[in-house]
Amino acid sequence: MPVATDPLLAPLADRRPTVERVARLPAGFAAAGATAGIKASGTPDLALIVASNGPVPAAAITTPNRFAAAPVRLSRANLSETGGSAATAGRARAVIATSGSANAATGPAGDADQVEIGEAVATAIGCSPAEVLHLSTGVIGTRLPVDRVRATVARVAGAGLAATDAALEAAAVALRTTDTTTKVATASVDAPAAGGGTVTVTVSGIAKGVGMIHPRMATMLSVLLTDATADPRTLRELLAGAAATTWNQLSVDGDTSTNDTVVLLASGMAGAADAADDGAARAALSGAIEAVARDLARQQAADGEGATALITCQVSGATDDADARGIARAIVASQLVKAAVHGRDPNWGRVAGAAGNAVVADGAILEAAGMTAADAAARTARPASVDPARMRIAIAGHLVYDGATGGPVPGDKAVVREAMGGDEVLIRVDVGLADGTGEAFGCDLTEGYVRENSEYTT
Amino acid sequence: MPVATDPLLAPLADRRPTVERVARLPAGFAAAGATAGIKASGTPDLALIVASNGPVPAAAITTPNRFAAAPVRLSRANLSETGGSAATAGRARAVIATSGSANAATGPAGDADQVEIGEAVATAIGCSPAEVLHLSTGVIGTRLPVDRVRATVARVAGAGLAATDAALEAAAVALRTTDTTTKVATASVDAPAAGGGTVTVTVSGIAKGVGMIHPRMATMLSVLLTDATADPRTLRELLAGAAATTWNQLSVDGDTSTNDTVVLLASGMAGAADAADDGAARAALSGAIEAVARDLARQQAADGEGATALITCQVSGATDDADARGIARAIVASQLVKAAVHGRDPNWGRVAGAAGNAVVADGAILEAAGMTAADAAARTARPASVDPARMRIAIAGHLVYDGATGGPVPGDKAVVREAMGGDEVLIRVDVGLADGTGEAFGCDLTEGYVRENSEYTT
C-alpha cells in the first residue's frame, strides 16, 4: 500500500505537453540575428523573422503602459490595418526586433524612426509596411540609430535569413539585453490533419527578460512561431489565454515596461486542421502555446536580474482559478518574500502576509487581449478570498503553517532552510476554500539586482 | 522684476501648519515606554498611553490585509463595542503597543494572548477591556510573552505613567523595531474656544516604520493624541482624510503589513469648540492632523530599511487629485525608480514608465475608513490619465522630459546627478491635463535593504 503523501508537499500536476528548451523553426518561416551596432557592447542586437510565403495570421499582446513605446504603437496600428477592427490581431509578413534602445518616450521623432525602419523591412523583403511587426527593448528615451538599422536590415534580408533552427536561435540571441541566458522553448504535438489523419504541429518561442517584468500582462519580448493553421482571432484568443496563466503570472520587479510585446505567427504549413473550426486542432495548439509560454516565463523568472533562485508559487483550494492566480502573484511579487528566499529563510509569515494582500485583477489581461480602454478603465480589482484559519503553507516540501491546527507548525527551521538551497524554491499554498488552482513565477531579490539597476544608464 | 521660474523646478507650495519634530503630550493623557523583554535586544518594547480622566473619543485605521493580526482585530472589535456600529471609531481609555512580535498568524492562541493583555491593562488602570486599543509589530507567527507583558503593564501602570513630553517620547522609542530614528511630530494651531475666543489645540504623533509599508492604507504603527474636542465619527473622518494624502502615499517596499494601525485619541482638554459642530474648529484640527501625519510619513520614508534617500514625488496638472496621487504613488513605489535614485541616476525613463503604469485605487482608503468588505470588494481600479505628449518631468530641480517639445530634454546628466546628491530627492511631474495635485513619499532601494530582509528571522 503506498504511503499517503500530503499533496501540499509536492508541485501541482502538470498536464501540459512536453517542452524542449531548443529553437525549432516551424515550416514557413525564416529568421536571422545580426549586429546593427545599437548596443555599445557590439553583441547581436537585431532579429528579423519572415513568413516565407507571404503574410500569415498574427496576434499580439502589448503592454498596458500609457507610455507605450513607438514600436508597440506601430505594431498595434499595423495589426489593426491588416486585421480590420482588431488592434491586436491581423496578418504579418515580418517581425523586426531591436535591443539596446527602447525607442520609448522619444516623441514624434521616435515614431518617425520606427516608421522608417518598417519601410526598410518592407522594401527589403517585398511587403507592405503594415505587414511588419515591431519589437524593441533597451534604455527608455534614447533614439534608434536608424541608418545602421536600415543597413543591417538590407544586408540580413538579402543573404542572412535562413530557414534553420540555428537562425531562430540567432534571433533569440539578438533579443537579449541583460539576459544571461538565451531563452528558447519548443513543443510539438499531434493535431488532426486538414484532410483526415494526424500531423505534428510545432510551436517554438524565443524570448528575452529580465527587468521591468510584472504581472500586468505583456511582460517582456517574445516571438512565438507555429506551423499550425488558425485565423487571427483564434490566435489572439489562444495567446491571451496562455498569457493569463503564464506571463501574466511572472514578476521580476513589479514594473511593467513601456515595450513589452508578445507576438504569435501561424504559417499553416503543417497541414493541420484549422483551429478556428476544429476543436481538437484548437485544443492541441492551445496546449502547445501555453506550454511554451509557461516554459519561457519560467526561464525569464530564473534569469531575473541578479536572481539566484526561481520562485515558483503554486496555489490550490482557492475560490476559483482567478483567486488562485491572484494569491500566487501577490506572493512571488512580494519584495519581502523575495528577500527572504534570497536568504533561504523559510519566513512563511511573509508568505501569509502577501497572500492577505492579494488582489484579483485579471482585467489587465482582458485589456491586453483587446478590450477597449473604456472597458479596461471600468475593470474591477477585488481582494482574493483568504481565511487564515483554513490556509496551509508549505515551503520546499515542508509544512510550515496550518491554519486549522492553530497556525505555525513546529519544526526544525534548519531543515527547511536546507531544502531551499537549490536554484528553484517551491512555495505551495492551499487556501482550503474550494478547488481553484494557479501558479506564479518570480525570483529572489538580491544585492546584485540593486547594483545592476542603480548603475544602468550612468 | 522677479525672474519667472518654472514651478515644475520647485516643490509644491505647502499651506499646512508648521510641524515640530518633538513629542508634546496633549493635556488629558499620560504615557510610558518600558522594556518587557519581547525583543531579544533588551531595548524598550512596550508603550502604554492612557487617557487620564476616563475614556475619550477615538478612531483607528487598520490594515486591509486579510491576515490582520490579533491586536488589529481586537482593536476593531473594541471600537465597535464602544462606538456602536462603527468598527473604526468609538471610545478608548488606553493604548497598548508592543514591538518585537507581531502576534499575527498565531491562531486562536494568539487571540487569547491579546485578550489577556487587554484584561491586564484594564485591571491595571481601572477600565473596561473594550476601552483598550492594541497595536503590535514584529515577526509574524511568533507568540507574545504574555506573562512578561502583563507584569510590565502592572509595573508601568502603577508608577511608570507620566503626563510629560518625555513620557510620550519614551513611548515612541518603545514602538521602534528596525527603525534607526524615533519618529515624533507635533503641530499646535489656533482654534475657536468652546466659550468664544481662541485656544491652542495640539496634535502630537508618534510612529514607527519601516518595513512592510505600502500605499494600501494603514501603513505602519502610529498614535496621534490631541487635546481638541471631537466625537468618534469626526475623528474617523479627519483621520481617513489625512491618511489619504499622507500615509496612503507612503511606500517603502510595496508590502502591506498584517499589523498596520493608526489610532487617534482626543481628550477635549484644550477647551476648543467641538469639531463635530464648528467648521473652524474642524478645519483647524484637520489641518494639524494632516500636517503631523504627513511629517511622520516623511520620517518613515526617510528611515525606510536600508534607505539612503527620501524620495518625494509631487505631481501637478493631473485630471484630479486622485489621479495625481496615483501617479505619485506609482513613481515612488517603482523598484526601478528606487534603484535609480540609489545610484543618483537621473533615469527619467523609469519615472515615465512608472507614471504610465499608474492606477487610481483610493478604494482601499474608503475600506480603511470604514467601508464594508462588500463595498470594498466592488471598488474599482482605473488607470490614471497620462499623455506622453503633455507630461513634463523634473528631477532635483532640472527639467529632463518635456513631452510637448519632443520628449527628452538635452542636458548635462552629471549636473542632475550632482543635484540628486542630498538625502532627499524631489521628482516633480506635471501631467499637463488639468489641475489635480498630489504627492507621495518613498525611499531608495539599496543593497542594505536586501541584506537586512534576507537575514531577518534566521
Image (cartoon, coloured by chain):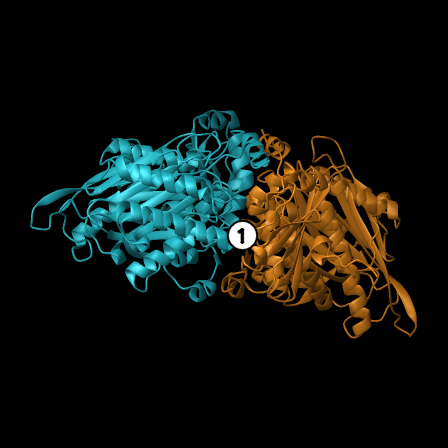
Chain colours: A cyan, B orange
Q: Amino acid at mark 1?
A: Arg
Quarter occupied by the N terminus of chain A: top left
* Residue A207 seen in this snapshot: no
* Residue B253 seen in this snapshot: yes
Local secondary structure at mark 1: loop
Front residue of this view, candidates A197 and A27? A27
**Tag 1 subunit:** B
Q: Position of residue A336 (x, y in %)?
A: 56, 39
Front residue of this view, candidates A217 and A336? A217
Look at the picture and state if B13 lies above or below A167: below
Which of the 4 quarters of the picture holds residue A396?
top left
Q: Which residue is depicted at the point 91% across and 74% down?
A: B195
Q: Is residue B23 left or right of residue B449?
A: right
The residue tagged 1 is B66
Q: Decide: few, some or many residues near mark 1? Use Cα within 10 Å; few <14, some 14-19, many ≥20.
A: many
Q: Which residue is depicted at the point 69% across and 56% down?
A: B8
Look at the picture and state if A134 lies above or below B269: above
Quarter occupied by the C terminus of chain A: top right
Which of the 4 quarters of the picture holds residue B145?
top right
Q: Position of residue B127 (x, y in %)?
A: 77, 56
Furthest toward the right, the residue is: B197
Q: Is residue A287 left or right of residue A327?
A: left
Furthest toward the left, the residue is: A196
Q: Position of residue B162 (x, y in %)?
A: 87, 47
Q: Is residue A444 left or right of residue B82?
A: left
Front residue of this view, candidates A449 and B50? A449
Q: How many marks?
A: 1
Q: Is residue B226 left or right of residue A141?
A: right
Q: Position of residue B142 (x, y in %)?
A: 60, 38
